[in-house]
Image: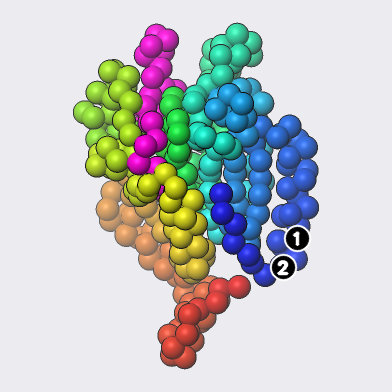
């Protein structure tokens, strides 16, 4: 993934230092990189198309725990090392069960739940394979940017099981319940262009332009007022769970947080001075 330069800050230095600890703890099944206000979370098992094993599940949860505490990270890009985002679950997971079925699923789901719950925007860079767990990690992100030739699908039925890492919950919210059922029941694989047509991804790019498209989107989000960005994420997620009136009450609370933040003063000053705002 492309990197963007940023001014060094005390918090940035702390996060860079934390990166070493994260990589040691996660045994490099998930790489963590910082570039200015952007964090890259990279699935790192390229020799098996980033298939996810137990170490990957634990690493994903651990990195998300760290990110949850960070106010200095304004956008997270989730990508895969090498040719693919992820080809799905490594068969070693099925061969080495951990506890009861319920315990195993909860253990595997933890990182996906934490990724979906991160307070800052998340972008999935979808290339090569995004199958099974690989598609579900993309579904846990806020926005998906896909290469036109990427292969996306939930193929769990071929093994007599269902997508249990958020697939049955996240997919219908994007493509509708009927299309979600069809895709899962028929084990359909679609490319990035068709995924965009169905609303499964928000941006589609030619394969050699994927990184640039992700970089551009991440830069635009990073340049936006951070308090308002986080509040919008919270409010949009809330919209599917509460009545409109309750949601609008929450909008008022979110707006108060924006007015009370230094971002508001900087935005007004930049507007008056006819310059781009600098949110630090």
Does 62 appear in magenta?
Answer: no
Nearest the eye: 228 or 186: 186
Residue 230 visible here: no
Does 153 appear in magenta?
Answer: yes
| Label annotation for residue 13 | 1
Mark 2 packing: few (<14 Cα in 10 Å), some, or many (20+)? few
Q: CA distance from mark 1 to mark 2?
A: 6 Å
At x 38%, y 66%, the residue is 252
Q: Which residue is mark 2?
A: 9
Nearest the eye: 190 or 143: 190
At x 49%, y 41%, the residue is 116
Where is residue 280 drawn, in percent x and y?
Answer: 60, 73
Where is residue 229 drawn, in percent x and y?
Answer: 46, 62
Where is residue 163 drawn, in percent x and y?
Answer: 41, 22
Q: Which residues are magenta?
A: 142-170
Labels 1 & 2 near each other (Cβ < 8 A):
yes
Residue 28 visible here: yes
Q: Is the residue 192 above or below the residue 48 in the image?
A: below
């Amino acid at each position: 993934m492309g990197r963007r330069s940023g001014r060094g800050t005390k918090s940035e230095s702390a996060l860079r230092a934390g990166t070493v600890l994260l990589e040691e703890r996660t045994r490099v099944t998930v790489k963590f990189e910082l570039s200015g206000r952007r964090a890259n979370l990279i699935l790192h098992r390229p020799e098996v198309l980033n298939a996810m094993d137990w170490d990957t599940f634990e690493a994903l949860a651990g990195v998300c725990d760290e990110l949850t505490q960070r106010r200095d990270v304004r956008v997270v890009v989730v990508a895969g090392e090498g040719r693919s985002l992820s080809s799905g679950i490594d068969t070693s997971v099925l061969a080495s069960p951990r506890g009861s079925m319920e315990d195993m699923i909860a253990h595997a789901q933890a990182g996906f739940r934490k990724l979906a719950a991160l307070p800052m925007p998340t972008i999935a860079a979808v290339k090569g394979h995004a199958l099974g767990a690989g598609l579900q990690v993309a579904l846990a992100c806020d926005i998906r940017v896909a290469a036109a030739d990427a292969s996306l699908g939930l193929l769990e039925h071929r093994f007599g099981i269902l997508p249990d890492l958020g697939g049955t919950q996240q997919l219908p919210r994007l493509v509708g319940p009927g299309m979600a059922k069809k895709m899962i029941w028929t084990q359909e694989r679609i490319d990035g262009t068709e995924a965009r047509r169905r609303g499964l991804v928000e941006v589609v790019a030619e394969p050699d332009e994927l990184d640039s498209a992700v970089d551009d989107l991440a830069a635009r989000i990073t340049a936006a007022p951070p308090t308002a960005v986080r509040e919008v994420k919270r409010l949009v997620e809330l919209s599917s769970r509460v009545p409109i009136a309750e949601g609008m009450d929450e909008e008022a609370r979110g707006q108060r947080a924006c007015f009370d933040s230094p971002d508001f003063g900087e935005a007004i000053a930049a507007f008056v001075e006819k310059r781009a705002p600098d949110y630090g």
